[in-house]
Image: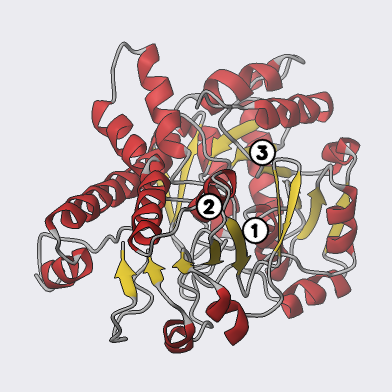
Amino acid sequence: MSRTLEVDLLSALKDKIRDRSARIGVVGLGYVGLPFLVEKAKVGFHVTGIDKNQSRADMVARGENYIGDVHDAELRDVVARGLVSTTTDFEKVAELDVIVICVPTPLDSNLTPDLGFVRQVTAEIARYLRPGQLVSLESTTYPGTTEEVMKPLLEAGGLEAGVDFFLAHSPERVDPGNKKFGTANTNKVVGGNDPASLEAALVFYKSAIEHVVPVSSAKVAEMVKVYENTFRSVNIALVNELAMLCDRMGMNVWEVLDAAFTKPFGIMPFYPGPGVGGHCIPLDPHYLEWKAREYGFETRFITLASEINRNMPDFVIQKVTRLLNNDSKAVKGSRILQLGMAYKRNIDDYRESPALVVYEQLLALGADIRFYDPHVSIVEEHGQTIQGLGELTIESLEQADLVIITTPHSNVDYQQVVKHSRRVLDTRNATQGIVSNNIVLL
């Protein structure tokens, strides 16, 4: 009897999705959730955003955008058309047909996965779960989370996954600042807890995404995501280590890489820097590293890569110390101007940014340090607020004993930076093509 019920529920949900009468919920209105909400509303679904942050929920309800990858006009349009509503109350879950979870999955101080947000949200959804709903996790996590953590919580009330409701994992693929690939045209991997759940999830994601890639299970989908970012972590670590070796050997690592990348096969461009940042690369490899221990497996290669990347801010500090020493100055008391606080160019996201680590370390060493970032005016981290310079002036450049480029934003005039600075430490090769004896590369 339950098998017939599953078919009826699945068929009804698919019909609702296809005729756009399905009501969608997005839990977490951050860098992943808000763009997804807008894309689903754009194709005609009514989408409810659920976020515990009242201020954020209110902003979305008014059509006020705070995410760089969301177009202001598109958010205003779907709100004006009545396709978007927001709430901080999980009671609304009972009215929804599809619930997509886009909450943070951080690491704790011991680099152990912290699934607190996923557990809390799943427990809240379980209170209002009803037959025929699809629950999909988009948050990056270790393989097994959907099946081992979420499924028991959702089934605690008596409903069965794959029979009474549907459960899937479809990892987010968000690249902040990418003008070519957004939510709609980025290939979407989808894995279900069971065949019926996969079928429901495929119909749902195909409704707004151009190309959907099914895999055999939610666990495989989870592994896909952590592998993608571990791949980047490992290759960035390789070029970071090469940068440190070239520094010892007196070579320009950027020249080496530019020449190497002219090879038309068997190589892929990756570049060094002051470390890695963002919501994925500094975190995801540790999820895989942690889970592997459950199977008695040590991910030595992955662990080493993460260690190298985490130590890059220390290497930057070493170069700063060396450069100031060459000018008969100590770090303590030196006036340092840091250009960039975001973790990558042309965005305002400073989550896990190595630039912030460099700043904090130099501050701890007694440097008189300030920062300028055209996209980040204020940094709020670890209970502290750091105010950036309102504008980059010739006076601020000339007064600095050292200028450090930590984020290569394209709307900074690096010709002027070099012209008016005593010395520039460029950790991102932002000054490429500028000839001056006061530039020092990473």
Q: Position of residue 110 (x, y in %)?
A: 52, 23
Q: Earlier in the sequence, mark 1 or mark 3?
A: 1
Secondary structure of the residue carrying tag 3 is strand
Mark 3 neighbour class, 10 Å CA radius: few under 14, some 14 to 19, many 20 or more: many
Q: Nearer the viewer, residue 125 or 417?
A: 417
In the rendering, which numbered label is found on residue 329? Answer: none
Secondary structure of the residue carrying tag 1 is helix
In the rendering, which numbered label is found on residue 353? Answer: 2
Vertical position of residue 15 compared to residue 376: above or below: above
Calculate the distance from the C-alpha at mark 3 to the C-alpha at mark 2: 35 Å
Calculate the distance from the C-alpha at mark 1 to the C-alpha at mark 3: 16 Å
The quadrant of the image that shows the N terminus is top right
Mark 2 residue type: Ser
Residue on which disc 1 sits: 36
Mark 1 residue type: Phe
Q: Is residue 280 visible?
A: yes
